[in-house]
Image (cartoon, rainbow, N blue to C red):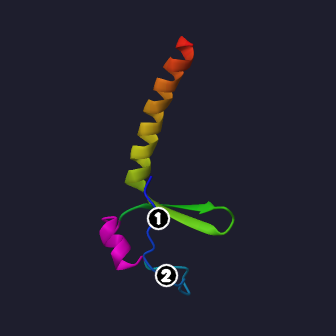
Amino acid sequence: MRRPIFYGSTTISDKGQVVIPVEARNALKLEKGEKLLVMGMHGDAIMLMKLSGFQKMSEEMAMRQKELDKVLKDI
């Protein structure tokens, strides 16, 4: 598991907008118009995730579930 990387800080604008630091955009290959999921965590944290990354993770989890189901059936 990779350790979290601190990219800096940002401020919420009057319109509720935030700027993602350029270092983070470059490292994560975020492009203009890219869809991000916004999730609340632990009551005071926000996680942003690329929609494409979530879709890949979801597909992998579904595959793992099939493998686990087979193992459990064989027990």
Q: Quadrant of residue 32?
A: bottom left
Instruction: Decide: few, some or many residues near mark 1? Use Cα within 10 Å; few <14, some 14-19, many ≥20.
Output: few
Instruction: Give the magenta-colored segment's residue range.
Output: 20-33
Q: Decide which of 38, 2 is in the foreground and name it.
A: 2
Instruction: Decide: few, some or many residues near mark 2? Use Cα within 10 Å; few <14, some 14-19, many ≥20.
Output: few
Q: Position of residue 25 (x, y in %)?
A: 34, 71
Type of amino acid at the residue the image marks with label 1? Pro
Q: Could you tell me which residue is drawn at 42 percent across and 55 percent down?
A: 51
Q: Could you tell me which residue is drawn at 32 percent across and 68 percent down?
A: 27
Q: Position of residue 58 (x, y in %)?
A: 46, 42
Q: Which residue is mark 1?
A: 4
Q: Secondary structure at mark 1?
A: loop
Q: Could you tell me which residue is drawn at 34 percent across and 76 percent down?
A: 23
Residue at the outermost top position: 74
Q: Secondary structure at mark 2?
A: loop
Tag shown at residue 9 = 2
Kindly check if marks 1 and 2 are in contact, taking CB atoms under 8 A apart as contact.
no
Above/below status of 50 relative to 5: above
Q: Is residue 45 magenta?
A: no
Whichever of callouts 1 and 2 sits on the residue coming sooner in the sequence is 1
| Residue 31 in view of the camera | no
Type of amino acid at the residue the image marks with label 2? Ser
Q: Position of residue 50 (x, y in %)?
A: 41, 58
| Image quadrant containing the C terminus | top right
